[in-house]
Image: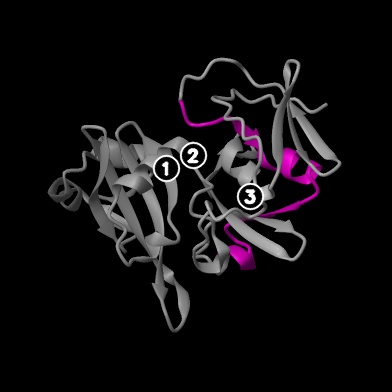
């Protein structure tokens, strides 16, 4: 049996799901918009519920264990009873996916595959002839989901690709590759800085610059301490 050792949140039991459910929307380059990865202690974790939908698996309780099965393949997870976040259990992507017969390929920011996505690190989920990509964020999935639900993405590429690269308190930084219909993603990208105000995220700054002056930060209402916590380069 394989027990997840992460501090897992809520388990949502799904009795039946169909492979590659329409509930999971794919954007450009097969990037899944409803399944967010998170780099936790060197492992990519994802919410259990959408992963079960994606793989067309069945979930059931077996004593103290939660059994996730697909055909004759099954993985057992021991999930806690407490449900503090209300978002869904986080499980290690590779452990669950590969045990159920699919393949996971990590694509780092310097790989050719990530370059196609504006150097966003991600994983490819290979299941037979089907492939989907899951972006690896630097924030837990419930934070990413809340941020994406709030911001006005419009027709920008963020409707398909946006990586939450840093979260510091009430501030967050995003990496947003620039898209051109004729050429695809280019090397230039936008850095977004968002602030959570009254429980909702809103843009304070969107910039193609690598570094910013203190005057620019002040004009955007971004404290220098917040910019430093986000790892922004500040001009002297």
Marks 2 and 1 in Cβ contact (< 8 Å)? yes
- Mark number, residue 18: none
Pick whichever of labels 3 and 1 is earlier in the sequence.
Answer: 3
Q: Residue at x 63, y 49 (%)?
A: 54
> From what the image shows, is residue 139 above or below residue 217?
above
- Mark toward the viewer: 2 or 3: 3
Q: Secondary structure at mark 1?
A: helix
Q: Is residue 134 above or below residue 85?
A: below
Residue at screen point 43% across, 56% down: 162
Query: Position of 165 compared to 197: left or right?
Result: right
Give the spatial CA distance, label 3 vs label 1.
17 Å
Place of residue 150 in the rendered image (x, y in percent of width and height, measured from the top left): 30, 46
Give SS at disc 2.
helix
Q: CA distance from mark 2 to mark 3?
A: 16 Å
Give the residue furthest to the front: 16
Query: Which SS class for mark 3?
Result: helix
* Magenta part of the chain: 86-114
Magenta run includes residue 176: no
Q: Which residue is mark 1?
A: 145
Which of the 4 quarters of the picture holds residue 146? top left
């Amino acid at each position: 049996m394989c027990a997840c050792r992460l501090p897992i949140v809520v388990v949502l039991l799904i009795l039946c799901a169909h492979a590659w459910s329409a509930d999971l929307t794919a954007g450009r380059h097969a990037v899944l918009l409803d399944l967010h990865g998170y780099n936790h202690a060197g492992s990519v974790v994802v919410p259990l519920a959408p992963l079960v939908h994606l793989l067309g698996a069945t979930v059931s309780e077996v004593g103290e264990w939660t059994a996730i099965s697909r055909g004759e393949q099954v993985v057992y997870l021991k999930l806690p009873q407490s449900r503090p976040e209300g978002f869904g259990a986080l499980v290690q992507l590779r452990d669950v996916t590969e045990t159920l017969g699919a393949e996971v390929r990590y694509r780092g920011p310097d790989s050719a595959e990530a370059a196609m996505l504006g150097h966003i690190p991600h994983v490819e989920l290979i299941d037979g002839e089907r492939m989907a990509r899951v972006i690896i964020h630097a924030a837990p999935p419930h934070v990413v989901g809340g941020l994406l639900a709030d911001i006005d993405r419009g027709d920008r590429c963020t409707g398909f690709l946006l990586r939450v690269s840093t979260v510091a308190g009430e501030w967050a930084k995003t990496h947003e590759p620039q898209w051109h219909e004729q050429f695809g993603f280019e090397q230039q990208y936008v850095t977004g800085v968002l602030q959570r105000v009254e429980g909702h995220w809103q843009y304070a700054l969107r910039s193609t610059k690598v570094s910013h002056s203190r005057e620019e930060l002040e004009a955007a209402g971004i404290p220098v301490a917040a910019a430093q916590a986000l790892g922004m380069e500040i001009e002297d």
